[in-house]
Image: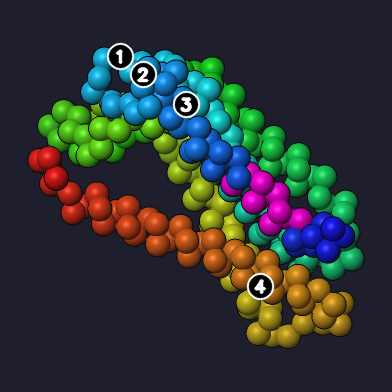
């Protein structure tokens, strides 16, 4: 429908498509577990569950996760360009958004699939006290390998850093957008006020989601003891 191909709905559509791919990967988890462990459920502590078989499952998570966050970043970029260059066309920018989002997903997914002895593997949470790996969860989920110590760059390079950089840029754009709105818009921006508003609301909503998720994650990690709890 032409309405959903216009600015900014097209950006939300393609991000939703990346999220749908990520959801499909979660639905296929039992099938991947059968391939890796021979059963519908895998546990980190079982020797028959080989992390080296996680390459495809890990790369699939990485691709769709990074693509989703890249489309989120494109929303911030589009908001910035809408404010700074009101005469540029969204249709011309869209091809660059596709190239950036899907390309960035491939840049992260390919090493995840190839470097299966150092990147792809089980995403686990451990306390790491006294050099020992005390697992808070023994369920195996293929994504980024978490070594036996906390001094590892894999999760920062392949997840945390892209997320932090995206949100830092988006925060700056949001701040400048509301700052400009408070001062008032010139006549060239009035016809794009709806676009500015929808992009801003979407950015704030997504950032609030991750903020709540991070708070819950930190709370559970800090509140869990080293026993069987």
Q: Is residue 141 left or right of residue 190?
A: left
Residue occupying the point 45% across, 44% down: 160
Q: Is residue 127 left or right of residue 206?
A: left
Mark seen at residue 37: 2
Residue occupying the point 28% across, 27% down: 43
Q: Are marks 3 and 2 in contact (CB under 8 Å)?
A: no
Q: Which residue is mark 3?
A: 31
Q: Where is residue 213, by image quadrant?
A: bottom left
Residue 117 in percent (x, y) is at: 42, 16
Whole-angstrom CA distance, mark 4 to mark 3, is 45 Å
Residue neighbourhood size for the residue with mark 4, other residues' Cα within 10 Å, grouped as few (<14), some (14–19), many (≥20): some
Is tag 4's residue or tag 3's residue first in the polypeptide sequence?
Answer: 3
Q: Where is residue 218, by image quadrant?
A: bottom left
Name the mark nearer the viewer: 4 or 1.
1
Whole-angstrom CA distance, mark 3 to mark 2, is 10 Å
Q: Nearer the viewer, residue 144 or 186?
A: 144
Q: Nearer the viewer, residue 26 or 225?
A: 26
Q: Are marks 2 and 1 in contact (CB under 8 Å)?
A: yes
**Segment tinted magenta in the rendering:** 10-19
Q: Which residue is mark 1?
A: 48
Q: Are marks 4 and 3 in contact (CB under 8 Å)?
A: no
């Amino acid at each position: 429908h032409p309405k959903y191909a216009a600015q900014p709905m097209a950006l939300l559509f393609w991000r939703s498509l990346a999220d749908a791919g990520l959801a499909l990967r979660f639905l296929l988890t039992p099938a991947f577990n059968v391939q890796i462990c021979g059963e519908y459920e895998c546990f980190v502590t079982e020797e028959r569950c080989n992390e080296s078989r996680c390459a495809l499952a890990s790369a699939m998570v990485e691709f769709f996760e990074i693509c989703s966050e890249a489309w989120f970043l494109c929303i911030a970029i589009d908001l910035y360009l809408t404010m700074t260059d009101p005469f540029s066309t969204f249709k011309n920018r869209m091809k660059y958004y596709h190239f950036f989002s899907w390309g960035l997903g491939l840049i992260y997914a390919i090493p995840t699939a190839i470097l299966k002895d150092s990147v792809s593997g089980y995403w686990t949470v451990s306390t790491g006290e006294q050099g020992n790996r005390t697992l808070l969860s023994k369920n195996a989920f293929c994504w980024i390998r978490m070594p036996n110590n906390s001094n590892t760059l894999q999760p920062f390079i392949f997840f945390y850093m892209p997320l932090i950089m995206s949100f830092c840029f988006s925060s700056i754009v949001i701040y400048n957008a509301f700052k400009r709105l408070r001062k008032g818009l010139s006549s060239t921006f009035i016809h794009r006020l709806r676009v500015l508003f929808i992009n801003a609301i979407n950015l704030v909503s997504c950032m609030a989601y991750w903020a709540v998720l991070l708070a819950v994650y930190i709370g559970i990690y800090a509140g869990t003891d080293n026993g069987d709890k």
